[in-house]
Amino acid sequence: MMRKDTVCFNVFRFHPDNDKKPYFQKFEMPFTRKDLTVLEGLYYIQNRLDNSLAFRSSCRAGICGSCAMHINGKYRLACNTLVSKLKSNTVTIRPLAHMPILKDLFVDMKPFWEKYEHIKPYLMPGKSLPTTGERIQSPGERAKVDILIDCILCACCHSSCPVTASHEKYLGPMAFLNIDRFVSDTRDGAKAERLAIVNDEHGVWRCHTVFNCQEVCPKDLDPSGSIAHLKMEIVKNIN
Ligand code: F3S
């Protein structure tokens, strides 16, 4: 029987070199502060109960996206998830999905970064813009980009998307949101090249409009809206 001033962390464990299969391990810890975060709980385990627990974190302020994981049924950032808000005295934690597990909650994000690299996430002059000099933007043009630039590349959307699970090469919601960020930017001149990247068999047409990506984004961004925008741009500019 759990005491009210304690909380149980039920944590996914797996060391591919030593374990035949993954398992969950329970850790009980004091729960005397209402502002205890899931990330602080993981550090409590690592510092006081089991220093072999592996997980990733960095800024602890919801900015770097490093501590994304599956917490009580949803992909979220451990650093800004309060245990008190989970309304359960058991916190069940799994690693991000669709990426190889290196150890416990620590995954190999190479497949995710490869997709980011593939979309060329930087301004390109293309054929229509000069390669030198300033590219002036009006406040209105800038506002269209402002709603897209906040992606912290945490991979919550990537992990929650069922199409990403079944099609390894599907570019996925993170890539689409970030392509839309450049397609919507008047300082970028490579729209045709970018639309061609998402207008193929692994691109936007494979999305099943499940909306998990929009639901889990810790920055309240809308990759599904970007997918709809990219489809419209493809129809207008390519076909
Ligand atoms: Fe996946 Fe989002 Fe489409 S969850 S299926 S990319 S709407």
Image (cartoon, helix red, strand yellow):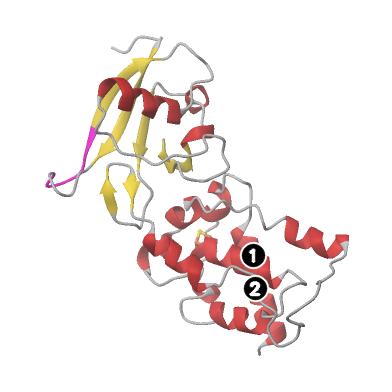
In the rendered image, residue 25, in percent from the top left (x then y), is placed at 23, 30
Which amino acid does the dot numbered 2 rest on? Leu
Disc 2 on helix, strand or loop? helix
Q: Is residue 87 left or right of residue 239?
A: left
Q: Which residue is mark 1?
A: 226
Q: Which residue is mark 2?
A: 230
Is 205 one of the magenta-colored residues?
A: no
Check the image and report above or below for 214 versus 136.
above
* Discs 2, 1 touching: Cβ within 8 Å: yes
Task: Point out the stretch of residues depicted in magenta.
Answer: 19-24
Q: Is residue 117 left or right of residue 237?
A: left
Mark 2 Cα within 10 Å, few/some/many (few <14, many 20+)? many
In the rendered image, residue 195, in percent from the top left (x then y), is placed at 61, 80
Residue nearest the observer in this picture, 167 or 140: 140
Is 21 one of the magenta-colored residues?
A: yes
Please tell me how many numbered marks the rendered image carries. Answer: 2
In the rendered image, residue 119, in percent from the top left (x then y), is placed at 54, 72
